[in-house]
Amino acid sequence: MAGAGYYNIHSQVQSSTASLLIEAFNEAASLIPAAHQGRPVVIVDYGCSEGRNSMGPMQSAAAILRARSPDQPILIIHTDQAGNDFASLFDLLQNSSESYLNQAATYGLAVGRSFYQQILPNAFVDLGWSAHAVHWLSQAPQAHATSFWTLWLEGSFAQAMAEQATRDWHQFLACRARELAPGARLLIIAFLRDKDGHIGVEGILKLMDQALSGMVADGSLSAAELGGMVLPTYFRTEAEFRAPFNDPDLSSMLILEHFQGVRQLDPFRSANQKGELGKAVAGFVRGFAEPFFKSRLNPEHAPFADKLTDRLFSNLATLVSNSGDLNTTTNMALLTIRRAATGPASQS
């Protein structure tokens, strides 16, 4: 993600859709058994980024636990890759009025490690949360791309990305199965690809491709650079989300209690009404795409990375402003997963 708090400021989509899962997250918090004396209740935020979109859910869950047991220690652990901007997260924890650290006996930690590995000890986690993170892949196949986005890849490249997404999703769940305590729950919100292959923001994605192609046309980027730019993400269908729970080894540990596909209303509606749609959309895309774009520039262009990035997202803002009212209603998947208490478990 773009650092120095930029992602926090421009993650409108992530912030608005995370609210869809708050009620279920609060219910899961209320179901956590009383912890042993002296042991904290452990809540883990898998894929925290800079933390803005985690403050509300974490504060809410902590408040529910605090009301039930005023003296119970609560430990909240934020995880993301080692290169994440944890400084912005720590600043929020220290200074935001929404910080859960304002509550008594509530503590925060961060771990810089990929969630495609086991991060914490076995049976350590009482409640898990992951919002807008599992579409990021652990790695992406190397091939010439025709789009910045996996939605429009074809042939063997598309197949390789799908296979990587399958491995990653299974690995993510297997790691969480070990970390979750018996009876603990993990709640996930993620983009959902519908039966027509759409996630709802295709208009934005196509304009980003157009902005990149325009920079190749004017000589700002090379065709080879563009061919190496496919964001390492994958948007799963409902069937792909459900598939690992048919694996006997995994389903003996994890139960998919609830799956729901929902459509989230346009998070850019307010910006559009103010005539600021281009600026808002470009900021949103830049928030998650800037570091990857810079990483794919060749040595000749790398010294001008900031200038090229500014040009790209300025072009995107102009394209969005000139496109009229984009439909950015997003398809989201809401999942509640429970760690089996003992013995084999069956999917519900």
Image (spheres, helix red, strand yellow):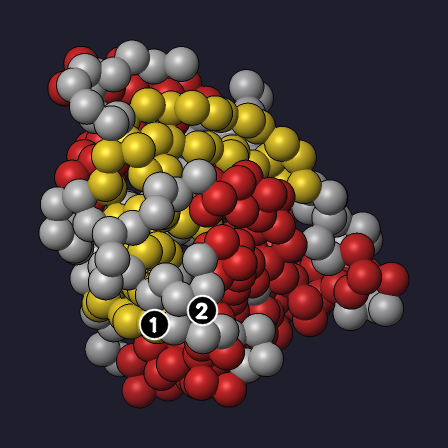
Q: Quadrant of the N terminus?
A: bottom left
- CB contact under 8 Å: marks 2 and 1: no
Task: Tell me the element at label 2.
Answer: loop
Marks 2 and 1 sit apart, C-alpha to C-alpha, by: 12 Å
Q: Does residue 164 show up?
A: no
User: Within 10 Å of the Cα at label 2, are there few (<14), some (14-19), or many (20+) other Cα atoms?
Assistant: many
Camera-side residue of 277 and 293: 277
Task: Give coordinates of residue 114: x percent, y percent.
Answer: 21, 56
Comparing marks 2 and 1, which lies closer to the viewer? 1
What amino acid is at disc 2? Gly
Q: How many marks?
A: 2
Q: Residue furthest right?
A: 273
What amino acid is at disc 1? Gly
User: Within 10 Å of the Cα at label 1, are there few (<14), some (14-19), or many (20+) other Cα atoms?
Assistant: some
Task: Tell me the element at label 1.
Answer: strand
Residue under the image location 32 percent in, 23 percent down: 255
The circle on residue 108 is: 1
Task: Give coordinates of residue 73: x percent, y percent.
Answer: 34, 65
Task: Give coordinates of residue 123: x percent, y percent.
Answer: 17, 43
Q: Relative to 79, is 122 above or below? A: above
Mark sitting earlier along the chain (2/1):
2
Question: Which residue lies under the disc numbered 2?
Answer: 51
Residue under the image location 87 percent in, 62 percent down: 273
Camera-side residue of 249 and 253: 253
Q: Quadrant of the C terminus?
A: top left
